[in-house]
Image (cartoon, rainbow, N blue to C red):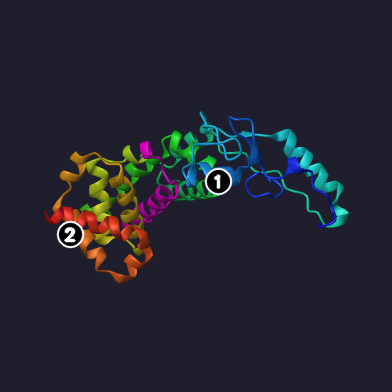
Amino acid sequence: MAEIEVPPYFLCPITLDIMKDPVTVSTGITYDRDSIEEWIFSQRNNTCPVTKQLLVDPELTPNITLRRLIQSWCTLHASHGVERLPTPKPPVSKPQLMKLLKDANSPQKQIKCLETLKSMASQNQTNKRCMEAAGAAEFLASLVVKKTLEASRGEDSEFDLSDSRKACDEALSVLYSLQLSESGLKSLNNSEFVESLTLVMQSGSYESRAYSVMLLKSMLEVAEPSLLINLPHEFFAELAQILNDQNLTKGLKGNAQSTNHCVSMGEE
């Protein structure tokens, strides 16, 4: 591989590696999808790494022609140990998501649909943004509210209660993995959802308690002052208890400071 000269336009400007899934941004520069998604969505940059121009549109357009050229070049040089790059999966479509969210309303299909959503979210940032735009966050939050209410009332059988908790755990896991935008987080800032997260912190599984705290931390960072003022006493009591749980706070790491700040607000 070292003796083969790789065409420079096959290389991602960020990593200088051969692009597996080339996509073009609004400035006309092409990057590998994983690298530019990390730059824009995880690192929260709004400029093109090469031109330093503002990215007026965050949409990423697949550069199919370049991808095929790269794949052909890799096949041509297979005898030199170059592996052919597989064709990347296309991002999830809105109709596909809408059908999945609709099916998730069925108790028989719910867990399987939530697991599929989790798998989609783990594939790339584009899927996460598509899921947020399709209303997945609001759906998942409403599901958490519904399941926590069912569990708190204790009206279901032990089998149904176990299913409700499992669905709630899966929904929280997907919701946290979406890494929602500021507007997405603000859409979750309502008393019903905050109350449900408080209930999860009281009696949920270890993972769900951690997801609840981390979601609340992100939500409270963008919340209106009125929501913070009206938080119930139980909310602060649970946060205080979580801070005393050394195992849980180790998992939360950087979120502990924000959690401490919330507890101090409840004591004022």
**Residue at image mark 2:** 237
Image-quadrant location for residue 104: top left
Q: Mark 1 touching mark 2, by CB under 8 A?
A: no
- Residue 124, disc: 1
Where residue 166 appears, as percent x and y from the top left, is: 38, 56
Q: Label 1's element? A: loop
Q: Is residue 86 one of those drawn in magenta?
A: no
Give whichever of discs 1 and 2 has the lower sequence position. 1
Q: Is residue 167 one of those drawn in magenta?
A: yes
Between residue 57 and residue 126, name the one nearer to us: 57
Main secondary structure type of the part rendered in magenta: helix
Residue at 48% x, 51% y is: 115
Image-quadrant location for residue 88: top right
Vertical order, 184 against 110 (above or below):
above
Please state the extent of the stretch shown in magenta in the rendering.
160-184
Vertical order, 25 against 267 (above or below):
above
Where residue 161 appears, as percent x and y from the top left, is: 31, 56
